[in-house]
Image (cartoon, grey):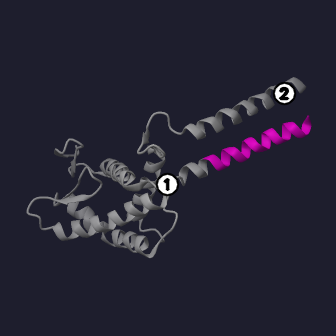
Amino acid sequence: MKMGWKLVTAGLLLLNLTACTAKVVGDPNRPITINANVVVDIRGLKQTATGIEALVAQGGQL
Amino acid sequence: MKTLRFAIIFSTLIGMSFSSALQAGQYDLKEMTPEVTQALKNRQARYGELQDLKTQNSVGENSDGYVTALGDGSASGIAAAENRDREVIYRAIADQNQLGPTGLKVIETVFAEVQREKTRAGESFQLSSGEWTKKS
């Protein structure tokens, strides 16, 4: 039981480290550098675009 | 050891909940200015009519994230109004997220892709090559 908890803890610790790294890097498949200092995450931008177009189509509260 | 284990589990759960929220709001409109609010309201009010014009192929989605009046150009007025409102929204996203003029072009391209995906069968849209086609 104690060994099990150790394994779970180690696994979660590893997940935390890798997740933080992935967040910093962003989407490795479609980043776009638009100047030396700004990298646009296309997937994030597409989420915004999809949300806005859904708001327009549904006539939601502004 | 128990405290450390609890801290790791807790931080993981918190991190997971924050990551999805942050990702969803990464390029959102951070401030609903009166201009942006009006542009969205205009687009909402115009939405049904614009969809009808798309069905009639009087209007199509171009590759720049805007609409183009097709055929006899009778829909040019509504197309121009729609494009003005879209530009307000795109510029607001670029400004509020410090993406600059080059970022505006990226925003327009991404919105064009979203619009292209929403196009219904029989409606016209412009490919990135500039060629116009109809969705099958």
- Magenta portion: prevailing SS class: helix
Q: Which residue is mark 2?
A: A6
B98 or A42: nearer the eye?
A: B98
Left-right relation of B117 to B93: left
Q: Is residue B15 magenta?
A: yes
Give percent across and percent down for residue B12.
73, 41
Give percent across and percent down for residue B58.
16, 61
Q: Secondary structure at mark 2?
A: helix
Residue A41's place in the image compared with A8, above or below, is below
Q: Secondary structure at mark 1?
A: loop
Q: CB under 8 Å between callouts 1 and 2?
A: no
Q: For the point 90% across and 40% down, which residue is it? A: B3
Give, as a single range, the part of the protein colored magenta.
Answer: B1-19
Q: What is the chain identity of the residue bearing mark 1? A: B
Question: Which amino acid, by three-letter code, is at mark 2?
Answer: Lys
Residue B64's place in the image compared with B128, above or below, is below
Q: What is the chain identity of the residue bearing mark 2? A: A
Q: Is residue B126 magenta?
A: no
The C terminus of chain B, quarter of image? top left
Give percent across and percent down for residue A35.
42, 45
The N terminus of chain B, quarter of image? top right
- The quarter of the displayed image where residue A53 is located: bottom left
Can you see residue A1?
no
- Work out which residue is located at the far left of the displayed protein and give it: B72
Tell me how far mark 1 sits from mark 2, CA to CA.
39 Å
Q: Which residue is mark 1?
A: B27
Q: For the point 26% across and 65% down, which residue is it? A: B50
Mark closer to the observer (1, 2)? 1
